[in-house]
Amino acid sequence: MQLPIRESSALILAAVFLLLGTLCVARGDNIDGAVAGQPSVNQSTGKQEEAKVVEQPSVKTTEPWVITVGVPGWLAGASGHIGFHGVNPYVSVATTQIIHHINAIGAFAGEVRRGRFGVLGDFIYLNGQAGTPESSGLVSKVDAGFQEFIGEFFGSYRIIEGPRGWLDLLGGFRYTYLGD
């Protein structure tokens, strides 16, 4: 592709000006050509003037807030002996059976951290029910229901932080409720 002479000359001239401007900034030159920190010659009087170096105030960096949210999960099964008055059958309930009988479930986890300090908390709620329509003369219906609530809230202080991990000191509380 051939550019007209005027357009190519203008592009070359613009590139030269940009390159010279970049070199002057990189060297720290003033507009009149004196290097910063060295005396310059005033063109009208012919006297040397001391170039003043103005130091910028240091920028104080602040650590950003780090906010993390998530949805924890807990899959559990139940197994063991259960009984009443000497009748102790072995019961095993798999995780998939529990999932099929869930009425309500909710979970949330969050953490807010700034620097070495942080606050974190989460909760899990589960409500389920199962039953059987079988009747055996003495018992006409069997239903079982369960509820679970786990909630926790902690403050943290990061003792060690490195490229391979960290160690936090936690203080707070956890509440657990298992019921029917």
Image (cartoon, rainbow, N blue to C red):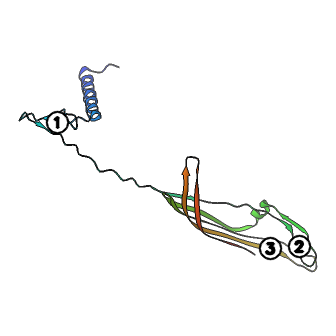
Badge 3 is on which residue?
144
Q: What element carries label 2?
A: loop
**First in sequence: mark 1 vs mark 3:** 1
Disc 1 residue type (three-letter):
Pro
Instruction: Give the alpha-carbon distance from disc 1 to disc 3, as whole Å.
Output: 92 Å
Disc 2 residue type (three-letter):
Glu
**First in sequence: mark 3 vs mark 2:** 2
**Residue 122 % position (x, y):** 61, 65
Give the residue displayed 26% in from the left and 26% down from the top: 16
Badge 2 is on which residue?
134
Instruction: Give the alpha-carbon distance from disc 2 to disc 1, as whole Å.
Output: 103 Å
Q: Which residue lies furthest to the bottom in this view?
A: 138
**Residue 36 % position (x, y):** 22, 37
Relative placement, left or right, of 89 versus 169 is: right
Q: Residues within 10 Å of mark 1 (few under 14, many from 20)?
A: some
Q: Is mark 3 on a helix, strand or loop?
A: strand
Q: Is residue 74 above or below residue 25?
A: below
Observer-nearest of 107 and 163: 163
Instruction: Give the alpha-carbon distance from disc 3 to disc 2, as whole Å.
Output: 14 Å
Please state, as top left, top right, bottom left or bottom right, where the N terminus lies in the image: top left
Cβ atoms at labels 2 and 1 below 8 Å apart: no
Q: How crowded is mark 3: few (under 14 residues within 10 Å), some or many (20 or more)?
A: few
Which of the 4 image quadrants contains residue 147?
bottom right
Observer-nearest of 76 and 165: 165
